[in-house]
Image (cartoon, rainbow, N blue to C red):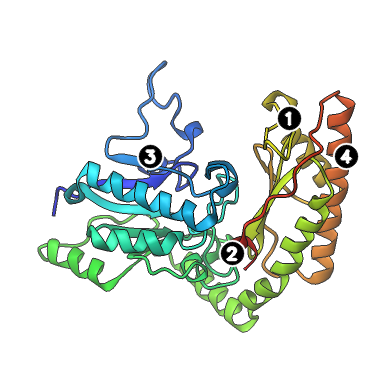
Amino acid sequence: QPQKKKIIARHKGYHGVTAVAASCSGLPGLHNHFGAAGSQNLPLPGFIHVTCPHMYRWANPGEEEEAFAARLAAELEDTIIKEGPETVAAVIAEPLMGAGGVMPPPRGYFQKVRELTRKHNVLLISDEVVCGFGRLGTSFGCAAYDFEPDLMTMAKAITSSYSPMGAVAVASHVADALAAGSDGSVFGHGYTFGAHPVSCAVALECLKIYHEDKIAENVAARAPELLSGLRDLAASSPIAGEVRGRGLIAAMELVANRETREPFPATMGVGAFFCDRARHHGVIVRAVGDSMACSPPLTINAAEIAELLQGYRVALQETERMVRDRGVEIGEGGALFTNSLQFD
């Protein structure tokens, strides 16, 4: 089926920065000004993006979790039909979206996506670079959200990032199709450092340690402490709009008004300020806009979780004080947003 070449991805998704990987990614910063001055050459033709499955920013007012998932599934199917199922090769998705802002999907989302991709003979690629090898408390993100992909991409934690390595796992029907279509020739998509023995040795030892030290079990034990702790300290702050995450990856989104979800002006640099203050108090935080993301070590213990939460607490108080000192009117209404899947 040589005509099946199009890839469907999601807005705010991140899959890398090569020309093709950036085309899969749904972040405008990776597309803007790529090419000649005044032009935008990314995404490349054949890469289509659908709605980001983040309830807080993309759901309609009053839309429930399952209704949001159903609407996104309908949009995906409409997109496949519009493009022509005979031209769509795959849908690529992170189980939990990482670099775009730590965004878990709504309940039932991936089951609907999996059903539609099978219906239209479209492959489903699970990008496990962030979620794989225990980050969500399971072996892979697709296990956490209970869906079976046709391909998985992985890196980072396969060696705990001590040595560079990436890998792709494919289902037997994909491997069989590749073999049948190769006419007996060598698979022509290798890399200079592919299967490097040092990285392979590090990966094997790393996977052994994950198993022997029960790393995924530690993540599952620590996750409620992290997520519930962040939610508890954010509940009393008028500038904390949402706490979200799963396993040992989480984010707190800061807003000027909880009730309307109005963001702070980008020129204020609220996220950067919080990030700086958290680091001052011993906690490494990544500011994705005004979403304060953390991804602590998979070996973290309860005492260290408490230390992390204290850093967030003080940084949040200092950020709120900075915002008030600059004369910004903070909305006092509304409550911290949450949805059920985030804390399962």
Does 126 appear above or below 282? below
Q: Closer to the N terminus: mark 2 or mark 3?
A: 3
Regarding residue 163, the answer to whether it shows in the image is: yes
Disc 1 to disc 3: CB gap under 8 Å: no
In the picture, the disc for residue 160 is 2
Which residue position holds label 4? Answer: 318
The quarter of the image holding the N terminus is: bottom left
In this view, the residue in front, 178 or 310, is 310
Q: In the image, what residue type sits under mark 4?
A: Glu
Between circles 2 and 3, the one closer to the viewer is 3
As measured in the structure, the alpha-carbon distance from the residue carrying label 1 to the one carrying label 4 is 14 Å
Q: Closer to the N terminus: mark 4 or mark 2?
A: 2
In the picture, the disc for residue 269 is 1
> Measured from the top left, where is residue 333 in percent x and y?
78, 40
Q: Quadrant of residue 37?
A: top left
Kind of element beneath mark 2: loop
Q: In the image, what residue type sits under mark 2?
A: Ser
Regarding residue 105, the answer to whether it shows in the image is: no
Left or right of 307 in this view: 150 = left
Q: Quadrant of residue 315?
A: top right
Q: Residues within 10 Å of mark 4 (few under 14, many from 20)?
A: some
